[in-house]
Amino acid sequence: MYYDLHVHSTNSDGVFEPSELVNKANELGLEYLCITDHDFITEKQGLNSIDNNCKTTLLPGIEFSIEKYDHMHILGYGINDIDKVKTYLKKVQLENLYICKRLLEHLKDDYKFNLDLDKYKNCNMSKGLIRRMLVEGGYASSMSEAGDLYTGKKSKYYEPTAKFPLEDTIGVILKSDGIPVLAHPCTLKLSDRELDCFISYLKELGVMGIEITNLSKSSRMKTNYYEFLAKKYDLLTTCGSDFHKNGDLFGIKNEKSKKLINKIMRW
């Protein structure tokens, strides 16, 4: 099986439009693709310029940013009631839009940066997009430098972005006939024992899966431990590249997400 269940587009902090990602997956021969943008759900009917001969199946997905836990994300797969999720997203999306607009004003007034917003008018405004704009405008040499200097915690005009409550997020995914999955557990920076206890807690809340392989973050040793936890708590397993830009790895070849994909396809 050749697939990718964790990629990002211009609707969050990726550099390719959703349709470009689908075409890229098709060119590589991927059977399934899931665009999991941060706090934004991509609808299939909204995609343009997809190759008429595309054989890649696009699966619905999203990656929620979770409050109170550093670097925690919950993936939502196979969501059927997209309107319910979009309603849930609105308040936080609006708060983050205002935060980004204030930041752009500060960058313009204080640093005299001339950022061409028209170039990005079809993109979902986020700090990730602002970092990309700064790099493409020549004001930073990399996304990490842009974050350190202008959008991160140590930058002059830093404001924390709004995020979603863990329990509510799992609940809305379930109520939307979706499958809640813990993304890249390694970013939680928990010991094996702490992660074991936390997975037990997430299972009680309704989490149904764990991302065992994330090409941009997970080591093989960690993957083996995540598979152990999945078996222990009877969780679905999933894998993805966490693709954002050219140069990133793209596509997974294994059978480890087969049960999850089959479940999505049945729903």
Image: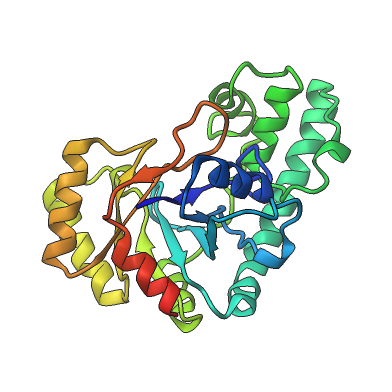
* Left or right of residue 167, residue 141 in this image: right
Going by the image, does 156 lie left or right of 209?
Answer: right
- Report the label total: 0
Q: Is residue 109 left or right of residue 243?
A: right
Query: Image quadrant for the C terminus?
Result: bottom left
Rendering coords of residue 263 (x, y %): 36, 74
The residue shown at (29%, 39%) is: 218
88 and 58: which is toward the camera: 58
Q: How is the image coloured?
A: rainbow
Residue at 54 percent across and 55 percent down: it is 56
Closest to the observer: 110 or 19?
A: 19
Q: Residue furthest front?
A: 53
Instruction: Please tell me which residue is depicted at 58% across the width and 58% down the height of the picture.
Output: 39
Quarter of the image for residue 182 reads bottom left
Is 182 situated above or below 213? below
| Residue 49 percent location from the top left of the image | 75, 51
Residue at image x 36%, y 70%? 262
Q: Nearer the viewer, residue 29 or 194?
A: 29
- Measured as percent of width and height from the top left, residue 99 is found at 70, 48
Question: Is 223 in front, or is 19?
Answer: 19
Point out residue 34 in the picture as x, y percentages from the top left corner: 50, 56
Which picture quadrant has residue 35? bottom right
Q: Is residue 149 above or below residue 70?
A: above
Tell me: residue 165, above or below residue 2. below
> Looking at the image, can residue 167 be seen?
no
**Residue 135 shows up from this direction:** yes
